[in-house]
Amino acid sequence: MSLQSLDITRRSATTTPPPQQRQQQEVAKLIDVTKCIGCKACQSACQEWNDLREEVGINEGSYQNPHDLTENSWTLMRFAEHEQNGTLEWLIRKDGCMHCADPGCLKACPSPGAIIQYSNGIVDFQEEHCIGCGYCVAGCPFDVPRISKKDSKAYKCTLCSDRVSVGLEPACIKACPTQALVFGSKEDMIDHANDRIADLKERGFDQAGLYDPAGVGGTHVMYVLHHADQPQLYNDLPKEPTISPTVGLWKGVLKPLATAAMLFTALAGFFHYVTIGPNDAEDNEEDHPA
Amino acid sequence: MQVNRRQFFKLSATSIGASSLAALGFSPEAAVADVRTFKLTRTTETRNTCPYCSVACGLIMYSLGDKAKNAKAEIIHIEGDPDHPVSRGSLCPKGSGLLSFVHSKTRLRYPEYRAPGSREWQRVSWDWALEQVARRMKDDRDANFIAKNDQGQTVNRWNSLGFLAASAASNETGYLTNKIARALGIVMIDSQARICHAPSVAALATSFGRGAMTNTWMNIQHADVIIAMGGNPAEAHPVGFKWAVEAKARNKAKLIVVDPRFTRTAAVADLYVPIRAGSDIAFLNGVIRYLLEKGAINRPYVKAYTNAAFIVREDFRFEDGLFSGYDANNPEVRYDRTTWTYELDDQGFAKVDDTLQHPRCVINLLKHHVDRYTPEQMHELCGTPIEAFLKVCELIASTATPERVLTSLYALGWTHHSVGVQNIRVMAMIQLLLGNIGLSGGGVNALRGHSNIQGLSDLGLLTDMLPGYMTLPRDQETNRAGYLAKRTLKPLRPGQFSYWSNFPKFHTSLMKAWYGEAATADNDFAYDWLPKLDKPYDSLRLFDLMAEGKVNGFICQGFNPLASYPDKNKVRGGMTKLKFMVVMDPLATETSEFWQNHGEHNDVNPADIQTEVFRLPTTCFAEEDGSLVNSSRWLQWHWKGAEPPGEAKTDIEIMSDLFLRLRELYEKEGGAFHEPIQHLHWPYHDPHDPKPDELAREYNGQALTDLADPDDAGKLLFKKGQQLPGFALLRDDGSTACGNWIFSGAWTEAGNQMARRDPSDPSGQGISPGWAWAWPANRRILYNRASCDPAGQPWDPKRRILEWDGQRWNGCDVPDFKIDQAPGSDMLPFIMNAEGVGRLFGADKLADGPFPEHYEPFETPLGGNPLHPKVISNPAARVFDKDRAMLGDSDEFPIVATTYRITELFNTWTNHVRINASLQPEQFVEIGEALAKELGIANGEIVQVRSKRGHIRAVAVVTRRLPVLTVAGKPLHQIGIPVHWGFMGETRKGFFCNNLTPYLGDANTQTPEFKAFLVRVEKVTGLAARHAELPNPPAPSRRWDGKTGATPKLSLLERLLKGRTEV
């Protein structure tokens, strides 16, 4: 499962197609909410492996700490109390990047190569190329990326691409005490999920099912839910997530237009230079991020 | 996504900029992506085990460098060891954050000294610190040593110095500590077991013979029904709980949770049932009543393997809440237990009635005893809805058949009560009735707390214990023969093994290990050198005596008693009366700073406190070799991965140095009873730094002479100096030495068995016999002979652990039985019990009765006990008068409170760990929605919780997970108080929950009643309603060269340089 630059499927804001020939085994993380005890081993292991340290915050009346995903907490246990037919359930969901097959963040990202998708399905941020515009935040149907207060770059779960690249499972997966987190090929994870769903149905959870939403082309982080018909019970997991139409608009229409405009400008500039000579003013230089 | 006009332009502008670059051909190089480099490629890996809880997960520590001489190892990452059979690579949030414990900002780096009345630490040298400590210890010992008591009996004890040993220290540290402490005559020594699982030892030993978890963690996966009651394993033992979840997933097991709160364990349970804190016996006696009434017991098992058929003495009584022999006037020993035993025949054997018809046979007495516990009575006392109770009964009853098995997972939810031992006893009895003891997937699984508290219990670091659960003599036991005779238990039924009949061999070998050549038959193997007890000096008594000013010195090894003992004000008050305190710890604990003002969290005036404090930095798990005993009795060796910070030393070095200084002082100056100090066997290669492997060899045991086969004198079994393979070889003539008989087999001639790393488990029963080493004799499932029927065949073939093959007992586990004793003989499976069977009737083993009875917590919301109005709370419990006066009543304090641990934190330890501090940064209490509404408290607001003894302030987490119960016809509210926050470390400052808790404990073990007491809750307004602050970083201590014994002071120049002009 080793990852190299040649294993890239897509790059943000890049028109040259990446090498396509090699297709890695698609990987997936399966989060079995029905086995999760909300212990936060995943949060701890994530901080430890990725050399992040979350701030020591305050308690706002919940087990959920920090209160939201941050640039230092790429995963977060979200807790919800739900009562149904007189039975209380404590629904605990590990939140974080879903590694969508059709990633809204990548589509929205204007900075070349700041977001990449590997052929194994991992969507990774390359912070050195990030310009901190925050489009990935807006483009994400799951509200996952966070902009750092320190360096204004976007951060999120990498699915431990550094570990996966040398053949190891992600840090959270390894740590999980109850096997609520499992990692493997997407195919195996779906099989595993189906076993779990059968067990849950036997235990009376008629609506148990797999969350692998088609609106984003499926995800490389999937959930087993007891109430797959109501994902919103789990702290507003979107029922039918899709990429915002604005991102589509930008990708589909604006970007080619912008490129054409740029090329036209460049050509115009070239002819201007050739026909008229160098321009005295150099103000425009500042517009180029390079 | 919403895009406004401005954003649209920005987006378009950026897209022009961004796309243009790509269009101009800049993109490919700039965008070449590579993942973050894998950071462990050439690090050094060291195996270790997690120092927090007793699941003892395997760790791999990754350190910088390849061990080259010029590279200083520094641990940069810790993750789970996938080979470890229990954890299989997992780590809970505490284990996953261990790196930030190793590198905690509040790790101690240098020895420090706090002078009387001082406001600050001074850095001192090791030499000066240890010299001062040794001096103070010797002076106090010489002044206060008691050689003979008032009756002229030789007692040789020193009871003006208290000692708390560390539950996260290695066996080697614990062994050496006990050896030194007893040689000095210290009796006031205790460990965390006192405030943790001491009741488990008493209850399980009474029931089955050994005070330990019966099965392994992995074996839980074979249960059909799991009951988590009196514990919250998902939260306190997350990785061990893996196997309960596995049982659900693979074995279709049902998980029941009975708890006052809907916990994280309940989050994955099939059935959650609420209960009033402190009413478990009423619930479980109700279960026994149900089982007996429905006949849902494993009858052949009960008849053959329990004392159901034994006939109890005629004068045994239980009336109006009291057992026979009660004496209200004796505050130390309330019961004369003479009548609590069996009727004996002429040969001294217990009489039995195999037809179970005799009215006084145990099963009939039990039936009568539990008859009062009807479902209605249960509901009245517990508040549990009857329907839910019956569902639990049905599921439990479903395991009375041989092919279905129940397991019990419990921890401090049962031990932390004034009836702690009896809580556990009921479950032990239920499991005996169902025939689930000794079976794969069954058992009563005491989930021990700290990583080595099982080991410290095994090594006897409790006031009245010696290694291997041998007990210290009492004052009146003036000669060795009488002492041994009382403990050498003769069989109570014909043909029984009664393993304690070997007591003299274990005891003599211990004395040889401790005193070597100096322990001889002529001096009764140094019997008089053991301190004798006039009463047990458990740590509740220790802090009580301290509060009375009767304790002068206190040594605290890896323990934070200021946070851990009930009624913090009393404990702190005691500490202020000490002359000196020595703290050995890797971290700057609250205890070591009890004299320091931390605002309202520790509101003291240092100038008023004259206690001298020595704070000595120790290594942590990552920086030393050694072994720890996990909950299922595995001794696992771990290895050092890095050097300690600063000048920190191992506990072994510190204790040895201290001892050698004392020995030297006694040699030079003489003093009180110096013989045991002078003669303590000290064979270590470097006397100042005994190595863990030397100590491990010592507690394993050696042949001191050539040992011949007792059956064939010509055959040499072992040569002088060889390591013994197990306790069966021990002798009572002084020819063997063994520091802890139950650990014998841990380090044999074949080497260190604790370091074995074969995780394979061919039987699939969750045994992994080649991983580490388990006491006793590498048995993994205790009482496994009971997994077979009397004829020697497994009750359930798919749970085959053992079977009789015609010659011997054979199977995947080491037989807990005489290996060649054929079925059909009289010998029965519970070989540690003189009866040979499990005890439904506890006989005279416990202080508060042979059958469990429901007594109210000492702070009862009912104000009485509906079962017996005159006897409300445990009549055998010891409550000091001053503490009784500090008990509140339900008029003033109407709410029941219970305390507990949460997954993210480990007591007050992980407060020093940044990662964990971020996961639960601030103190909170859990309050039910109905109560919050009644009190006008919104979620996230600050509340004050008060008991008769003190108060805390915390954030209110308002939840549906704490339901209102109807108890005795009235609504009853319960609140939950996690125990973790203090005033040191990285979490926000908090109040110890022990500001609130009552100072009293279980009748047998004095384990405090932390789990059921009364409080009131008030909303806080105004300034006090703010969130807590972060603690200040610890003040850097000043260097001092320590040449003289005088109180070191800063020079005027130094003070001027620091900008402080006061002289």
Image (tube, rainbow, N blue to C red):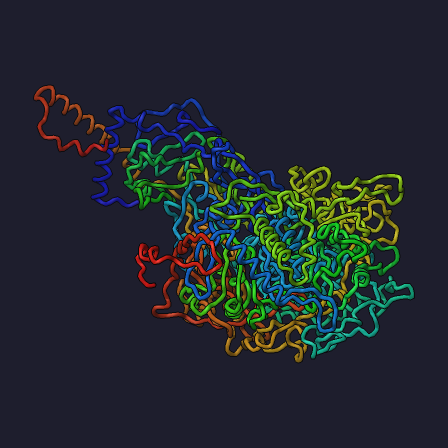
Tell whether B516 sits left or right of B19.
Answer: right
Give the residue drawn at x 88%, y 50%: B824
Which image quadrant: the N terminus of chain B?
A: top left
Residue occupying image coordinates x 48% and y 66%: B928
Q: Residue B855 vs residue B602: left or right?
A: right
Q: Is residue B860 above or below residue A5?
A: below
Residue B153 at what x, y percent from top left?
74, 69
Residue A134: % across, % down:
30, 42
- Tell which residue pokes out farthest to the right in this image: B346
User: Nearest the camera: B520 or B497?
Assistant: B520
The image quadrant where one finds the C terminus of chain B is bottom left
Q: Is residue A135 left or right of residue B641?
A: left
Name the quadrant containing residue A19: top left
Residue B802 visible here:
yes
- The image quadrant that residue B798 belongs to is top right
Frontmost residue, B967 versus B809: B809
What is the total number of numbered labels drawn onto the structure image? 0
The percent position of residue B285, horizontal first and vertical second, equals 69, 66
User: Residue B334 at x, y = what percent?
Assistant: 71, 74
Seen in the image, is B279 located left or right of residue A259? Answer: right
